[in-house]
Amino acid sequence: MKSFSGETQIRWACRELIKGREISHAHEIKEARGWRLAAIIHNLKNRYKWPIYKRSGANGVAYYRLGGNVDADTLEKPRSFHKKKEDARTSSIKKT
């Protein structure tokens, strides 16, 4: 499935939620240089079944947090959560 959010944006959102942080679109823009937090949250909730809660702040700003007492090890994580492994084909090429 094609993702329209960058890997680092998805990884950032997952990591911050797992840490117990409440995050917003403004946090994502500043820290991950992203702009698709609502789409990332939608996928985490619906596709991966993460128990994410939304709080509406001033001016309609949405704040997201992971539900309490969640074991992060049991959460299914998107492929983008894991850092890419170096391609074995390129690591064995000798440089001249």
Image: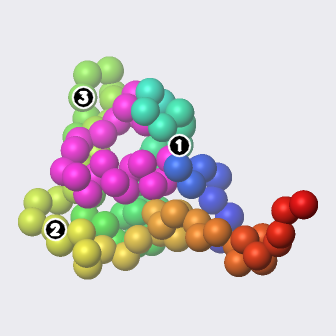
Q: Secondary structure at mark 1?
A: loop
Q: Tell me the magenta residue range.
A: 9-28
Q: Is any part of residue 53 visible from this angle?
A: no
Of labels 2 and 3, earlier in sequence is 3
Disc count in the image?
3
Query: Which image quadrant for residue 18?
Result: bottom left
Near mark 2 (Cα within 10 A), the count class, few <14, some 14-19 or many ≥20, is: few
Residue 63 in picture, x, y percent from top left: 28, 38
> Looking at the rendered structure, which numbered label has been put on residue 70?
2
Between 28 and 89, the one lying in front of the other is 89
> Looking at the rendered structure, which numbered label has been put on residue 72?
none
Q: Is 5 placed left or right of 92 in the picture? A: left
Residue 92 in picture, x, y percent from top left: 76, 76
Cα–Cα gap, marks 1 and 3? 18 Å
- Tell me which amino acid carries mark 1: Arg
Instruction: Name the residue beneath numbered marker 1.
Output: 36
- Tell me which amino acid carries mark 2: Val
- Tell me which amino acid carries mark 3: Gly
**5, above or below 60, in the image:** below
Residue 20 in picture, x, y percent from top left: 19, 51
> The C terminus lies in which quarter of the figure?
bottom right
> Circles 2 and 1: CB distance less than 8 Å?
no
